[in-house]
Amino acid sequence: MLDKIKILRDEVDAFDASGMEEAEAFRLRMLSKKGLIPSLFQDFKSVDPADRKEVGRQLNLLKQAATEKVNSIKARLEAEAESKQSGQKRPDLSMPANFEPIGSRHPLSVTRNRINSIFQRIGFVVSEGPEIEDDWHNFSALNFPEEHPARDMQDTFFVRKNPDIALRTHTSSVQVRVMESQKPPIRTISPGRVFRNEAISARAHCIFHQVEGLYIDQGVSFADMKQCLLYFAREMFGEETQIRLRPSFFPFTEPSAEMDVSCNICGGPGCNICKHSGWIEVMGCGMVDPNVLENCGIDSRKYTGYAFGMGIERIAMNIYQIKDLRMFFENDLRFLRQFESAI
Ligand code: DAH
């Protein structure tokens, strides 16, 4: 009997299985009701009582060893199968990435950022002011006479019919605030929203955006302004761009001018975009009127300066060839998505 046990014990100790079926077959052969080990327990009855103690001990050890062997092999095989499965779920690092859709900047933001950075590169700093303004900052300090038509109810949105408080009609109000609070030299640009009581059309809106520029120091000349604006035009519209200044009028500048740039589509000879003139109007500008300097506490005998103001929509329409201003405000995704690559 002990010999038989020893043979089976050697077999159990040496056994290993590479698959579940093999392990199960081994369990059945050794441990099932009619298996080899239970049948030895059957034979146990006929063992000599003197040997029973030792045989019984060996037999129990054999059963225990076989059970443990089968359990440990099965556990190992299960763990292996599981890790194989989760291995399949692990990401394949060589696969092309799954791109999450990213938003895009609004074309007006893109244009404003470009304008800002062009001027920042030559030392202008960005300043901002409130959208709800008082009469002083929007009109009076800027030398608008009392009866100037721009103050009219038809042009300006007044807040609660208070003739002193309105939505600013231009970002020139910020230059007043900057001059009141800073000492020259001043070199600033002020981007922002402006509001005018106008009918909405392809070329006009009651809300739009401007960038105001202001440079005040000793000895600043009209020639300085022209050079600065030529630099801007070439950075914005391309190296070959030409500018021209036409005499104009603004209450806050003297002399005043309108600046045109050579048409960046046809390059001069004339096309639909420039209405066959070869030129596109982009901004108003001029030397800051001494009255404005004095209104803001700057000595006009010591300091001179220039100012300019442009509409961001107008520039964006030109750069992106957008024919209808209303597209900027409709937020139609089919329109906005076209600017995904712009930064
Ligand atoms: N504020 C003017 C407007 O809204 C634009 C402008 C013109 C600003 C001439 C200036 C300037 O600073 O010098 O139409």
Image: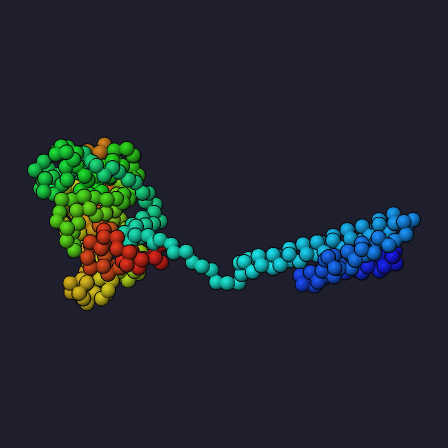
Q: Percent x, y for residue 14?
A: 79, 60
- What residue appears at the point 14 percent right and 37 percent down from the top-left corner? 158
Q: Percent x, y for residue 243?
A: 23, 57
The relative height of residue 75 versus residue 96 in the rendered view (above or below) is above
Quadrant where the image shows the N terminus: bottom right
Front residue (pair 129, 105): 105
Query: Which quadrant holds residue 263?
Result: bottom left
Left or right, residue 86 beside residue 252: right
Left or right, residue 289 beside residue 342: left
- What residue appears at the point 88 percent right and 49 percent down from the top-left corner? 52
Front residue (pair 165, 230): 165
The relative height of residue 340 versus residue 128 in the rendered view (above or below) is below
Q: Could one spot residue 220 in this view of the protein?
A: no
Quadrant where the image shows the C terminus: bottom left
Query: Which quadrant holds residue 339?
Result: bottom left
Query: Which quadrant holds residue 246?
Result: bottom left
Front residue (pair 211, 142): 211
**Residue farthest left in this picture:** 147
Front residue (pair 270, 326): 326
Colour convention: rainbow
Total tally of numbered discs in the picture: 0
Q: Percent x, y for residue 2?
A: 88, 56
- What residue appears at the point 34 percent right and 49 percent down from the top-left corner? 117
